Amino acid sequence: MELKDRIAAVRKAAGLTQEQLGELLGVSRQAVSRWESGQTSPDAATLAALCEKLRVSADYVLLGKEPGEGQSTGPAYEPPDTCPCCGRPVEGSICPSCGFTLPTTPPRGPRYAIISESIYFQNEKAAQQLEHFCGIPLEQAKAILKAASVTGVLLRRDLTDSAAQYLAAHLSRDLFSPLRIVEDAGEAEDALLAKPSAMTLPPPAEGNSGIGFFGVVLAVIVALLILSFF
C-alpha cells in the first residue's frame, strides 16, 4: 500500500469525504483528490496535521508501519464502560439501555453533535426518547423541550461518528424533524446550532420512518380541505 492509498484509507476510516478532509486541513477537495490519486503528496506540515486531526500514527501514514509494529505488544483496546450514546454504564458489547453496540477499536476523527431544527414541543414521547436514547433524565428532557427555541435544540454532543449515526437513526422522525449532525469542536451551544450538516443522515431505524410533524400537519390540512367540499 502506497502513501496515496494510506491517506485514502485513514480518511474513509474517519468517515470523511475528500471535501471534509480538505476543510479540516485547510486545503481544497482537489488537493486531497490529487494526494489520493498519487499526482502530488502533502507537505510535512500538512501530513503532521492530518495525523493529529485523524488521530493516526505518522509511522503508519508515512511508512505503512502498523501501530506497535516492531515493539512489545501493549494492552488490547478496552471498550468504554459508559455508552457513547446515552452515557449509562455498560457491561459487555451492547448497551442494555439504548441498544448501541460499543466499538471494538479506538474512536478516530472528529466528534459530532445531534441537533433537531424543529420539535413537536412538550410532547411526552419526545421527552421519553431523549431519556431512552440520549440518557437525559425525563424531567430535564421535558424542560429542554419546553425551553427549546425556534432555531433548534442541541440533543447530544461529543459523539463519535457511529454514535451520532445511531442516534440519528433511532430518534423518531415524527418527533425530531429535521435532524442534523454537525461537527463538534467544543464550541458554545449557540455556535453549534448555527453550523451546517457534517454528514448525511442514515436511514431511519425500523419504526422511525414516519412522515414527520410537518407531514402530519399537512395531512390534517389536506383532510380538512377534502371535508370542506362535502
Image (cartoon, rainbow, N blue to C red):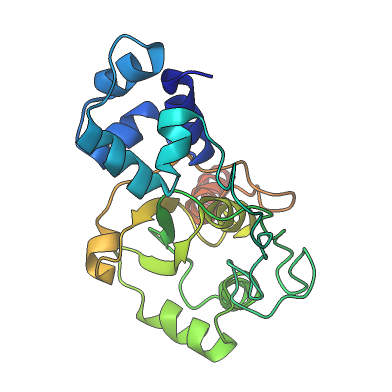
**Residue 197 in view here:** no
- Position in image of residue 33 (x %, y %): 34, 17
* Quadrant of the rendering where the C terminus is positioned: top right
> Which quarter of the rendered picture does the N terminus lie within?
top right
Tell me if I can see residue 205 in this picture. yes
Q: Residue at x 58, y 86 (%)?
A: 138
Q: Is residue 89 left or right of residue 113?
A: right
Task: Name the residue rendered at 48%, 21% in the picture.
Answer: 5
- Furthest toward the top, the residue is 39
From the viewer's perspective, tell me whether residue 103 is left or right of residue 55.
right
- Image side of residue 168 versus residue 115, left or right: right
Q: Indicate whether 136 appears above or below 126.
A: below
Residue 20 position in % (x across, y down): 34, 36
Residue at 69%, 59% (x, y): give it: 76
Q: Nearer the viewer, residue 64 or 110?
A: 64
**Where's residue 6, x and y in %?**
48, 27
The residue that appears at 65% across and 47% down in the rendered structure is: 209
Q: Nearer the viewer, residue 107 or 149?
A: 107
Above-or-below relation of 51 to 8: below
Q: Tell how many labels.
A: 0
Residue 204: x, y in percent? Answer: 64, 47
Q: Nearer the viewer, residue 50 or 167?
A: 50
